[in-house]
Image (tube, grey):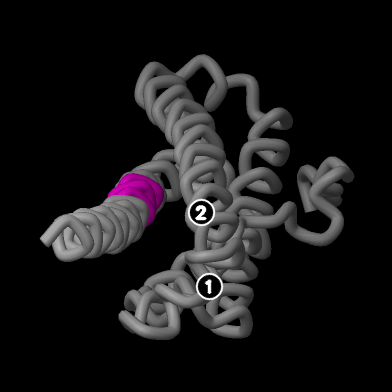
Amino acid sequence: MKGLLVGGGILLVIVMWLVGTYNSFVTLNEDVSTAWAQVENQYQRRYDLIPNLVSTVQGIANQEQAVFQGVAEARAKVGQITVTPEVLSNPQLFQQFQQAQGELSSALSRLLVAVEAYPTLRSNENFMALQTQLEGTENRISTERMRYNEVVRAYNIRAKAIPGVFFVSIFGFDKERQLFEAAQGAESAPKVEFNIGS
């Protein structure tokens, strides 16, 4: 009888440990999804602000057609990418998404640098408000990407360590989630060349 109680106690401890470990993976998985949703939220905010920014600037700075075209093309490319849960665990798809977002950031940087040649535009209240919103959005994107990376790091460590490595295989969790990495050349300021009065 005593052996049966000890065996039952050990079995109960093992079951509780299994349930606790499984539940921790569920929590981490949801944390990654929530953090990703926040990243997407900020990307959507930026995506929605761009037409207003471009139309405000374009009214005064008609000479910068190449810059406007670059922003429009980068925005269109971002709009074509749909991020599904599979993208977060596929390095190639995640890299494509990250590259498109990086191109959009770069195009917006070139636009804002080009604006420096137009004092009238820089003093325009609508432009200043849009620029402030866009800069705030870029900061929010950076913050949310950092938070996302922190949650993904916690998930990846748990998924690669023992016993997590067995749980991801048994219960079908992702073996690894993708981290945001700095875009190639992100350490360099964008270079904008244009001819005023041509």
Q: Which mark is residue 120?
A: none
User: 62 left or right of 124?
Assistant: right
Q: Residue at x 53, y 72 (%)?
A: 165
Q: Which residues are magenta?
A: 31-39
Q: Amino acid at mark 2?
A: Val
Q: Are marks 2 and 1 in contact (CB under 8 Å)?
A: no
Between 76 and 63, the one lying in front of the other is: 76
Number of other residues with Cα within 10 Å of mark 1, as a class: few under 14, some 14 to 19, many 20 or more? some
Q: Toward which corner of the image does residue 42 lie, by quadrant?
A: top left
Q: Which residue is mark 2?
A: 152
User: 121 left or right of 118?
Assistant: left
Determine the secondary structure under disc 2.
helix
Q: Amino acid at mark 1?
A: Val
Q: Residue at x 44, y 84 (%)?
A: 169
Between 30 and 43, the one lying in front of the other is: 30
Q: Which residue is mark 1?
A: 165
User: 130 left or right of 119?
Assistant: left
Q: Toward which corner of the image does residue 17 lie, by quadrant?
A: bottom left
